[in-house]
Image (tube, rainbow, N blue to C red):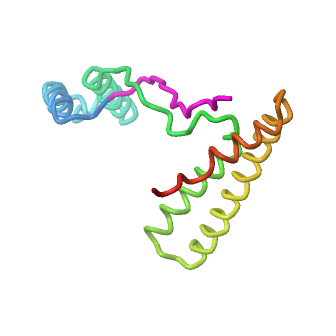
Amino acid sequence: MEWPRRTVEYTSRLCRPVTDKVLNILHSILGGLSWEYIRDPNILVNDAFNTSHQNFVDSCLIAFLEREVGNFSSYPKVDWYTEELRDIKNHLDLINELYDRYKIVDLKLLRNQTRLRYKLEMYRAKRKAYDKTILNSSNQQKTMWDIINSKRKPKKA
């Protein structure tokens, strides 16, 4: 029995990249606009603000063109990786960032507890997936040993 290889999913999304060139374009667009209406005493403050805001939004939409960029999913495509594990991992990453920034003892304790929970849930998810694979196999003993042997470290020569 051959085990499926870990694959990474390719997805694409729309974004507006910020580069020096684009910032220069935005600067030239905004610099080319007439802002004299702001000082006009006949225009209400709300109208002047709304016009300024709309000018800025329109300039950004012109300068920052949408581009489709591809990215690779950072989560492995294995049958045991669940949404719950993904959520715990995201939570753990956030706690790690906060602890690295502020070095608070309570954050360190929370980080350690969350890391332990993540490892435990990952262990449970793997066991559940492997149990399911073994139960659905026609040769359960061979499948079990294939799983065990795939997790062993290679012998040193």
Residue name at image x 55 percent, y 34 percent: 6
| Nearest the eye: 80 or 91 | 80
Q: Is residue 145 above or below residue 4?
A: below
- Residue 16 in the image, given as x and y percentages of width and height: 34, 28
Residue 57, quarter of the rendered image: top left
Q: Is residue 112 above or below residue 137?
A: below
Residue name at image x 25 percent, y 24 percent: 63
Q: Is residue 7 magenta?
A: yes
The magenta stretch spans which residues? Answer: 1-16
Image side of residue 54 versus residue 38, left or right: right
Residue name at image x 77 percent, y 51 percent: 124
- Residue 118 in the image, given as x and y percentages of width and height: 67, 57
Image side of residue 85 versus residue 28, left or right: right
Image side of residue 119 versus residue 71, left or right: right
- Residue 112 in the image, given as x and y percentages of width and height: 62, 69
| Nearest the eye: 70 or 154 | 154
In this view, the residue farthest toward the front is 157
Residue 36, quarter of the rendered image: top left
Residue name at image x 59 percent, y 33 percent: 77
Q: Is residue 38 magenta?
A: no
